[in-house]
Amino acid sequence: MEVKINFFCGTDRTGKSGELVFADDKFGVWIYQYDCTAFMDRLIQKNPHGLFDVIFADPPYFLSNGGITCRAGKMVTVDKGRWDKSRGVEENHTFNLEWLSRCQKLLKPDGTIWVSGTHHVIYSVGFAMQQLGMKILNDITWEKPNPPPNLSCRYFTHSTETIIWAAKNNKSKHIFHYETMRELSGGKQMKTVWRIPAPDRKEKRFGKHPTQKPLKLLERILLASTNQGDLVFDPFMGSGTTAVAAIRLKRRFVGCELEPLFIEISIKRVEEVIQESMLLE
């Protein structure tokens, strides 16, 4: 099936440059530097009945509040950038409703969406999904085996993130590769607690993203809910882990990211995995 998505450029609604910055038609990879809501509005105009089989989203957590954490044995700030600063509970929730409603429109009738987050944002995401009439299928607990310690010693150590898996609506007949997941789980039904290490040095050698997800996590998500050739979308692409997983598993990918540094990292990672895939052909 031909996918036409290279149909616009120019400036987004923030006044920043919006354009296609990477494309590989053979492997089915298109990366845009664009404000995600403006980008999705353009896509909806061209594809009112949906375009994507699966969406993975890792939205801002709104936890950049001047606090501290531990990284590599050192005390560092939790602030990640202006994009991660809270605008207050109501405005944060409005933002989640806005981008999720667009994702819902862009999903095919039987499409699903996965959204990751900490407690700072995930409850708003789940409520917004319910408000929009999505069907929540599962909530996955991603357990990190070696989390940073809690320096204040006034809370439990934060060692998990939640990933909500939801269908477009109650009529959706979602894909779930049960046998594949059972095989990965040693012949038993896979549970909703996934113990997966954080990204290693190899995954970060082109640069770091503060909320980067491990490749193994994204590969499991795509193996569970997509088929080869399906079209995957990531509206908050970050360092491009979803793109790398999609290429490795022979899925097509559309990504959107605004920050130039993360665009640069993503393209380097995508170019590398494409070269690796070509050597295997």
Image (cartoon, rainbow, N blue to C red):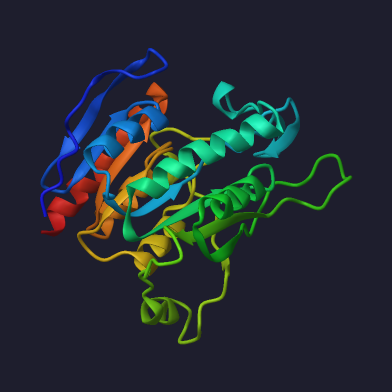
Residue at 39 percent across and 68 percent down: it is 224
> What is the x, y in percent for residue 269?
31, 40
The answer to whether one can see residue 198 in this image is no
Near-viewer residue (147 or 65): 65
Total marks placed: 0
Residue 67 sits in quarter: top right
> Does 93 sit left or right of 237 as displayed?
right
Q: Is residue 16 visible?
A: yes
Q: Measured from the top left, where is residue 42 in percent x and y?
A: 29, 31
Q: Is residue 254 above or below residue 166?
A: above
In the displayed structure, does residue 190 sit left or right of residue 75?
left
For residue 177, what is the image quadrant?
Answer: bottom left
Q: Position of residue 57 (x, y in %)?
A: 46, 46
Q: Which residue corresponds to the image point at 38% horizontal and 51% vertical from the top-left?
A: 55
Residue 4, x across and y down, in percent: 15, 41
Which image quarter is the C terminus in? bottom left
Question: Farthest residue in the top direction?
Answer: 15
Name the quadrant of the N terminus: bottom left
- Asked if residue 280 is positioned above or below residue 258 in the image, the reply reads below
Seen from the viewer's position, the closer of residues 273 and 262 is 262
Residue 70: quarter of image: top right
Residue located at (37% from left, 41% from top) = 240
Residue lying farthest to the right in this orientation? 154
Is 93 or 254 nearer to us in this picture?
Answer: 93
Q: Is residue 61 left or right of residue 221?
A: right
Instruction: Pick out the residue farthest to the bottom.
Output: 187
